Amino acid sequence: MTDTDLIQLQDSPSADASTAETPATVSVEMNGSVIDSEHTQSLPRTFRDAWVLDGDAVVIDMGSARDIHRAALRQARPALFLPLDDTLRRLARKDLLDGLSEDERAEARAAEAACQVLRDITIDPRIEAAASPDELAALTITALLA
């Protein structure tokens, strides 16, 4: 093969070049229906498992989105429980050995109250009141604890 033949091969349109001009259509299957992925472009992926078909449109089922959000909050809680649990263990051990001072009792009560706030975070009424996926996503564990 000569250099001229090689240049002609490079300049000739190939099957790949002709398909590169037309964007590939990606489809998504939902509940037995196949839809164009353009209908899902603007939806947040955080709540992907809450997507449902409403006619030809893909929408987010807020009930399912709330369940997904609560599960994410539950997964975020353990790191926040650790220092509180350490405090409660330390004070419980000290209580067995020496008894607790009034300040230590107050510290134990505060740690237990903080644990209860973390336990109750998934039943915060703001989660149920969120009217859109964006409002729900804004309810991070930090925002709910503020």
Image (cartoon, rainbow, N blue to C red):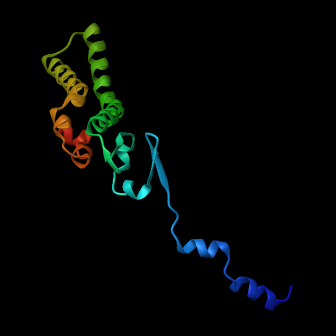
Where is residue 78? Give x, y as percent: 35, 30
- Residue at 27% x, 36% y is 66
Determine whether, in the image, residue 51 is placed left or right of residue 10: left
- Residue at 32% x, 24% y is 86
Q: How many marks?
A: 0
Residue farthest along the bottom direction in this orientation: 4
Q: Quadrant of residue 41?
A: bottom left
Nearest the eye: 34 or 20: 34
Residue farthest along the right direction in this orientation: 1
The image shows residue 117, relative to residue 95, as above or below, that is: below
Where is residue 133? Give x, y as percent: 26, 46
Q: Quadrant of residue 109?
A: top left
Where is residue 128? Give x, y as percent: 19, 35
Determine whether, in the image, residue 129 is placed left or right of residue 2: left
Q: Quadrant of residue 145?
A: top left
The image shows residue 110, relative to residue 60, as above or below, that is: above
Nearest the eye: 120 or 27: 27
